[in-house]
Image: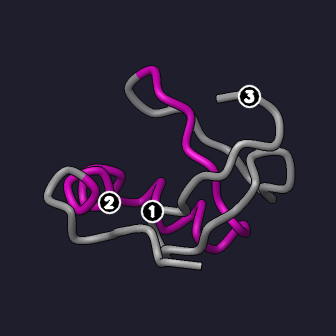
């Protein structure tokens, strides 16, 4: 991902710009971006839960 790319916070589903993310976390060699520290902490407590939600398509981009 480059600067100014749009990504999804896997915890809350918010679309965020990578350069505006309040927190990042690397898990299984992939960088995840978060809207805030609360979402980061929830992800860190159970990363597989959120990664699995993404794989199963239970968290999706909202149309803007």
Residues at marks 1 and 3, CA–CA distance in whole angstroms: 18 Å
- Pointer 3 residue: 2
Label 1–label 3 contact, CB within 8 A: no
First along the sequence among labels 1 and 2: 1
For this view, does 18 lie left or right of residue 12?
right
- Which residue, as the protein is rendered here, is positioned at the far left? 56
Q: Residue at x 85, y 55 (%)?
A: 20
* Mark seen at residue 60: none
**Cα–Cα span, label 3 and label 2:** 22 Å
Q: Where is residue 3 in the image (x, y as percent from the top left)?
A: 82, 34
Vertical side of 22 occupied by 1: above or below: above
Tags 1 and 2 in contact by the CB under 8 Å rule? yes
> Nearer the N terminus, badge 3 or badge 2?
3
The question of residue 41 being in magenta is answered with yes
Residue under label 1: 10
SS assignment at label 1: loop
Quadrant in the picture for residue 8: bottom right
Identity of the residue drawn at 20% across and 62% down:
57
Magenta range: 29-54
Q: Is residue 13 or residue 41 the one in the foreground?
A: 13
How much space separates mark 1 and mark 2, taking CA atoms? 6 Å
Specify whether residue 33 is painted magenta. yes
Q: Horizontal placement of 40 versus 59: left or right?
A: right
């Amino acid at each position: 991902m480059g600067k100014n790319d749009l990504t999804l916070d896997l915890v809350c589903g918010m679309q965020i710009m990578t350069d505006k993310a309040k927190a990042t976390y690397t898990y299984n060699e992939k960088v995840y971006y978060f809207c805030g520290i609360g979402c980061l902490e929830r992800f860190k407590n159970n990363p597989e839960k959120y990664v699995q939600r993404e794989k199963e398509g239970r968290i999706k981009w909202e149309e803007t």
